[in-house]
Amino acid sequence: MKKYSFRLNNVLRVRRVQETVAKSELAAANNEVQKAIAAVEQRVGEYEESLSSHSLGTTGVDMFMRTRYFNNLSSKAVIAATIARNSAAAEASIKRMAFTESARKVKALDRLDERARENYALESQREAERELDDLVTSRFPRPLRNAI
């Protein structure tokens, strides 16, 4: 019997490469999410610091307006960082779905390969049994039939 070869081996190899690429893209997207989360935490910290750094006893309209302006900028920075975090999370979700899909395709091809290997092993075993049966039956002479 000939040597086993999976007829979709080239497709399987391409799917595995696609899975690897999708996995690396997912890892990069998850890193971006972590950076965005850190940026949000930093901006919130800066905002809280700007709120607490100016005491309620500030005097003058100019000081009040300056404090209000910087607090407003800090709050906008928090909002922008939150939007960036949500965008990065959405992108990571898309990459996760792409990775899941590519992993599903690889798994399906692996199952097909496994079934084909099992069928090959079964056919190989059957062929070996047939050869053995042929050898055994050829060594023992058949009983002669007496013509009556």
Image: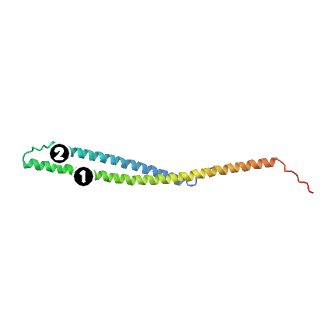
Q: Is residue 142 left or right of residue 89?
A: right
Instruction: Evaluate whether residue 85 shows in this view.
Output: yes
Residue 102 place in picture, x, y as percent: 46, 53
- Whether the residues at callouts 1 and 2 have beta carbons within 8 Å, the answer is no
Instruction: Evaluate whether residue 5 shows in this view.
Output: no
Residue 101 place in picture, x, y as percent: 45, 54
Given the image, on which type of amino acid does mark 1 rest? Answer: Ile
Residue 71 place in picture, x, y as percent: 17, 49
Given the image, on which type of amino acid does mark 2 rest? Answer: Leu
> SS at mark 2?
helix
> SS at mark 1?
helix
Q: Residue furthest bottom?
A: 148
Q: Residue furthest right?
A: 148
Q: Earlier in the sequence, mark 1 or mark 2?
A: 2
Residue 99 place in picture, x, y as percent: 43, 52
Dot 2 crowding, Cα within 10 Å, few <14, some 14–19, many 20+: some
Residue bearing mark 1:
79
Q: Is residue 43 left or right of residue 27?
A: left
Residue bearing mark 2:
51
Q: At 17% across and 45% down in the image, what residue appears?
A: 51
Spatial CA distance of label 1 from label 2 is: 16 Å
Q: At 80% across and 49% down in the image, what residue appears?
A: 138
Q: Nearer the viewer, residue 95 or 13?
A: 95
